[in-house]
């Protein structure tokens, strides 16, 4: 995804299973900022994780609303 986004900063990641990770990044494209939450899969040929199509980019102005929703999860 590095080629797609103008800028990206990894905020965190965690293991989903033996072949996948979830990456959370702050990204920008054409002057707009997002939080990108995406599944990355392990490519054995290149020995690195690659982004999948499974994910979403949340506009930064909605992150507060997402945080409020997640606070209710338990």
Image (cartoon, rainbow, N blue to C red):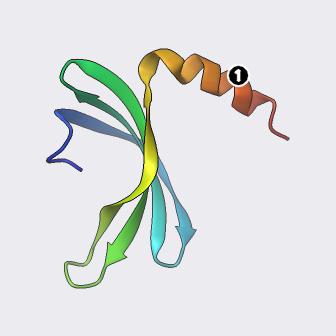
Find residue 65 and report its horizontal and vertical position in percent. 63, 19
Q: Residue at x 45, y 43 (%)?
A: 56
Is residue 65 left or right of 53 when viewed as pictured?
Answer: right
Find residue 10 and report its horizontal and vertical position in percent. 35, 42
Q: Is residue 3 above or below residue 65?
A: below
Q: Residue at x 56, y 66 (%)?
A: 16
Q: Residue at x 30, y 37 (%)?
A: 9
Q: Which quarter shows the C terminus?
A: top right
Is residue 51 left or right of 71 when viewed as pictured?
Answer: left
For mark 1, give the secondary structure.
helix
Find residue 60 and report its horizontal and vertical position in percent. 43, 20
Find residue 61 and report its horizontal and vertical position in percent. 47, 15
Q: Residue at x 76, y 29 (%)?
A: 71
User: Which residue occupies the foreground of this view, 52 or 67?
Assistant: 52
Q: How many marks?
A: 1
Q: Hey, which quadrant is residue 48 in on the image? A: bottom left
Q: Residues within 10 Å of mark 1 (few under 14, many from 20)?
A: few
Q: Which residue in the protein does label 1 denote? A: 68
């Amino acid at each position: 995804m590095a080629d797609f986004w103008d800028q990206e900063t990894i905020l965190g990641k965690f293991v989903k299973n033996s072949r996948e990770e979830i990456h959370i990044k702050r990204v920008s494209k054409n002057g707009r900022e997002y939080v990108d939450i995406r599944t990355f899969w392990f490519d054995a040929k290149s020995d690195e994780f690659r982004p999948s199509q499974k994910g979403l980019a949340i506009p930064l102005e909605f992150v507060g609303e997402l945080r409020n929703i997640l606070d209710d999860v338990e």
